Amino acid sequence: MLDEKIAPSYEEVIRRNPGEVEFHQAAREVLVSLGPVLAKHPELAEHKVIERICEPERQIIFRVPWQDDSGEVHINRGFRVEFNSALGPYKGGLRFHPSVYLGIVKFLGFEQIFKNALTSMPIGGGKGGSDFDPKNRSDDEVMRFCQSFMTELYRHIGEYTDVPAGDIGVGTREIGYLFGQYKRITNRYESGVLTGKGLEWGGALVRTEATGYGAVFFAEEMLKVRGQSLDGATCVVSGSGNVAIYAIEKIRALGGRVVSCSDSDGVVHDPAGIDLELLKRIKEVERGRVKDYAEQRGGATYRDGGDIWRIPCDVAFPCATQNELTAKNAAALVEGGCQAVVEGANMPTTPEAVDVLTEAKVAFGPGKAANAGGVATSALEMQQNASRDRWTFSHTEKRLSEIMTDIHDLCHRTAAEYGREGDYVAGANIAGFLRVGEAMVAQGLI
Ligand code: NDP
């Protein structure tokens, strides 16, 4: 329930942003936690911090024309929402997927404000993308699209202004083409303008692995509080992209067994445990599907459109996309004995599903805390770029692990301070909001 002092702000979000249902959902998920914060910090209400934080500082929408290999012209739409710069330059990924529209970019940008605050790094919140679908496009087509996209975006970004990175549909290949075009237009080798770069040209070790690894470190901390661990645990990981693959890798390293993964076509069930080398080859080298994995792996089965959450597990990691885990799915997880759900993706669990899990006392790690390892490592990449330095894998992974432990402890401690012991959603929302809100008050009415 929304506090009666906060409800009008939420109604204003809906009125001002008609039809942007994912943004409404993300805003509501944060605002429901904030009633007790305003009671304790009346200065935040006085300075209208909630109303200001829900309104992006700047929203850019632009045309992206490009030609495919046959010479046909296509027009896509590009977005960059610069949401909040109280703590540092706008920071957040670019998503290339046909479902992208302003409401998706705003939900992601809004979440990013609080996530970035939780990392304790000097980064604000933003997000961008396009309704372009890189799937089944040649490298040349992806390059032409990226060049056209950057031909507009370059004037809005910079290492001290706004620093984009990858997300769904944007990996090292796309970041390479985007960086190349930025360099060409500006005549500046400005490494810190994008993160997720290739290792040979300014990228940081561990950035590729960071979101998945970080979610698993966070899960391990949550389980520790309950006297449990991932060692010997059976896990289910949805998706088979960047976050999913490296979550699987770290779960295995900590002694867990991942028995299932998926893509938007179907689900693989591999009771012996996912063969990560095979999965990586199919997804990262051949850009194939999980169906191909099942065909090549003895003992694994595949179901078109299958329901991954019906597979019994101890810990579930939704690592694919928003709203992929519904109340019905949550009930199936509870029935299968699931002890913890940790979000690798952004907002993959619907609010109704979170209620089902909470009711059943399943530990729940929200994405804005659990998947913050990606952006935290991006900030480490910016740090290395700025100092012309390059850290080792083990040093960077250790930093990531410490950051995830700190985020876990901050969320856990804050939840307890506000009488919500074990509620990581409340802990993450309150701690993130306080950091940004206090900085906004200090910086005056801007
Ligand atoms: P990728 O594009 O690498 O992978 C996305 C994966 O999810 C693909 O396997 C995709 O399958 C699958 N997927 C998409 N929609 C569905 C669906 N409806 N059902 C099942 N599977 C689906 O993206 P990332 O791994 O980078 O991102 C995944 C999530 O993590 C997103 O929510 C993203 O915002 C979040 N995130 C990512 C970070 C990062 O560092 N990359 C940082 C923090 C959060 P298909 O190939 O069929 O589309």
Image (spheres, rainbow, N blue to C red):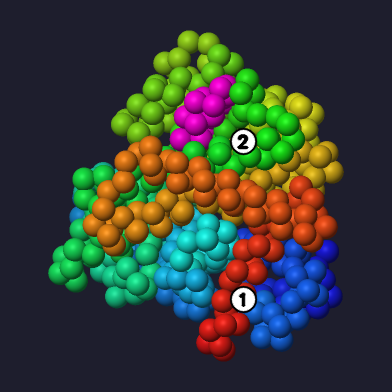
Mark 2 and ligand 1: say if the CB distance to the nearest ligand atom is below 8 Å: no
* 332 versus 356 height, above or below: above
* Amino acid residing under circle 2: Glu
**The one of 185 and 53 positioned closer to us in this rendering:** 53
- Mark 2 neighbour class, 10 Å CA radius: few under 14, some 14 to 19, many 20 or more: many
Q: Which residue is mark 2?
A: 220
**The one of 277 and 16 positioned closer to us in this rendering:** 277
Residue at the image position 31 percent from the left and 55 percent from the top: 384
Label 2 sits on a secondary structure element that is helix
Label 1 sits on a secondary structure element that is helix
Q: Is residue 188 left or right of residue 6?
A: left
Asked if labels 2 and 1 touch by Cβ distance under 8 angstroms, the answer is: no
Residue at the image position 56 percent from the left and 37 percent from the top: 216
Residue at the image position 42 percent from the left and 75 percent from the top: 60
Does the magenta-highlighted stretch encompass residue 254?
Answer: yes
* Amino acid residing under circle 1: Glu
Disc on res. 258? none
Give how far across and how far down residue 59 sits, in percent. Answer: 46, 75
Question: Which residue appears farthest toward the top when viewing the image?
Answer: 298
The earlier-in-sequence mark between 1 and 2 is 2
Residue range of the region highlighted in magenta in the rendering: 246-262
- Real-space CA distance between mark 1 and mark 2, rounded to the nearest whole angstrom: 31 Å
Give how far across and how far down residue 93 sits, in percent. Answer: 43, 58
Give how far across and how far down residue 336 sits, in percent. Answer: 75, 26
Q: Which residue is mark 1?
A: 438
Say how many tags the image has. Answer: 2
Give how far across and how far down residue 284 sits, in percent. Answer: 35, 34
Asked if residue 217 can be seen in this view, the reply is: yes
Q: Is residue 194 left or right of residue 432?
A: left
Figure quadrant of residue 67: bottom left
Q: Is residue 215 left or right of residue 27?
A: left
Check the picture and name the quadrant holding the N terminus.
bottom right
